[in-house]
Amino acid sequence: MSTLVGYVNNITETVSTIFEGMAITFSHFARRPMTIQYPDRIEKPVQETLPLRYRGILEVDLDICTGCLACERVCPITCITIGIEMNKETKQRAFSHFDIDICKCMYCGLCAEICPTGSIRHSQEFEGACYNPAGLVRHFAKEPVPLYKPKKGGETDPKLAMKAEVGLKYLDEFATPEGKAAGAEEG
Amino acid sequence: MQQLVDQLIQEGNFPGVPREIVYAGAMILAAFAVLSFFVAPLAGVTSWLERRVWARMQSRVGPNRVGPQGILQWLADGIKNLLKEDIIPAAADKWLFSLAPYVVFVGFLATFVVIPFGSQLIVADLNIGILYLLAVTSLVVVGILMAGWASNNKWSLLGGMRSAAQIVSYEIPAGLAVLTIIFAAGTMSMQGIIKAQGWAPWDWLLFYNPFTFGAFFLYFTAALAEGNRTPFDIPEAESELVAGYVTEYSGMRFLFFFFAEWGNLYVIGAIATTLFLGGWQVPPVTDHPVLLAILQFVVFFVKAYFWVFVAMWVRGTLPRVRVDQLMSLCWKYMVPLSFVCLLGTAGWMVLFPRGNRLASVGMFLVGVAILLQFAKRVRYQIRHARPELYWKPYI
């Protein structure tokens, strides 16, 4: 008798569980798919939706780079190479090259942390695909660029002032996770 | 079809040609037309739709790039497979290996001979139609076993053997469920079975009595197993057997197996519609022969395609069963239950020789109640999960 009860129970269990399962899968028709149709069928580019602290491909704003070489020294895998030459006539130092091999870069962010002006920083860019490794070396100084000299008492040139502010703001954001000033954390 | 050819011969269109050759030519032409203009697009669109349906069930999008909403995906896949290299393994039995996909394909395509798309639209209304259908679908197992053996690969052979065991086993409940309907309809001809039903749901053989109602589900389950569909796709279980009997196949030969599988889905739906769901029966709304034929075709197609959708839906719901579970399900549960359905219907026919209208309407109401309960559960699931709703079929 118990065998028969078990047999009938098995059948009812099979039917009722399949019934319930079918209801669950059918209810999924009413749901919006989770898929983000990258890259072409999205409302705005993914780069714009990424957080500011996202560690994308490194970028350098040479207009506010002092040429202190701190980033080159701190980089654990030496993917940054900076060349500075003195112009004999004007006695002015200028970048002959500023290359970052993003092929080697491991996105540790040490260079961005140590930069005094915030000129080297992670962008929101992540689409680095190209056809050969040489294309992954980013040349920032295509032609000799003079070094930036911070003026005492603040920047006067409005264009540079804006850039310096952006750099410092980035530095603040980056160095202090809670949004406090860098100095406050040390003290 | 035959009348049309006869008429053409009578009008003297083929002077001096033996009648048999004209018939053969007409048959080849008809088969070609059916294959290229109905079966191929049908199987292709089914493959695309299946991927879209699963995708939505898994909160994905599915193929939506080739053509509007990806509807031309099947053409892209077909072209890709045609251009691919056709590899025959060195150790394989060359002739059997090459032949196997066509045997499977013929087994599937031959079913279209007796599928009644309308009261006039049928290739041949054999008086043993349903028996012929059971016979030719068994040809598929020969092809699958052939593929498994000829590949000279242990996965292929295991897949082929499993498939043979599965199809042979599940033919019994499927055959018994069909026999239930043959009892109730009193004929084996496909058109005869449809004519035994009416356009109204309570005139369908599905609601003839409680036993045919059960037989329908038994038939559908057994047909899924015969078509090697999930949850009974152990012959091609990816996690165990790589790809089962298609492991060594590539290019167009590979596609032929899946062509047959997707097309077979429609055949399953068409048989279920013919036997249980009133086939092409339409309410008496028009007398115009062409309009009537179109209406009948549409009704039949929609009913049959609904079951294709259900098969996809089952595939999206249930996990694959183990081999021993598969066999115990068949021999311990489905075979006895289909015998119950058969004997129950036989007894019913003794009790009510002219059928019982009241019981039919009652069964119809039971069916409606089940659907309502189902709708309630779906509603509960939607409310319970509080998802972001998106009812549109496109994205």
Image (cartoon, coloured by chain):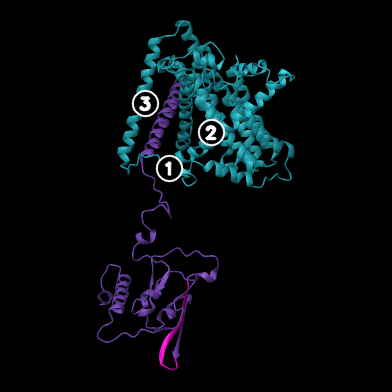
Residue type highlighted by circle 1? Gln
Which residue lies at the image location 36% right of the left edge and 75% below the top edge?
A113
Which residue lies at the image location 30% right of the left edge and 68% below the top edge?
A177
For discs 3 and 2, the disc positioned in front in the rendered view: 2
Do marks 3 and 2 share a chain? yes
Q: Label 2: chain? A: B
Mark earlier in primary sequence (3, 2): 2
Residue B165 or residue A129, whichever sits in front: A129
Mark 3 to mark 2 CA distance (whole Å): 28 Å
Is B389 left, or right, of B303 in this rendering?
left
Span of residues in magenta? A87-101
Mark identifier at residue B42: 2
- Residue bearing the label numbered 1: B58
Q: Is residue A90 magenta?
A: yes
Magenta segment main secondary structure: strand
Q: Which image quadrant: the N terminus of chain A?
A: top left
Element under label 2? helix
Q: Label 3: chain? A: B
Q: Position of residue A77 (x, y in %)?
A: 48, 75
Residue A92 in view, yes or no: yes
Few, some or many residues within 10 Å of mark 3 (<14, 14–19, 20+) = few
Q: Label 1: chain? A: B
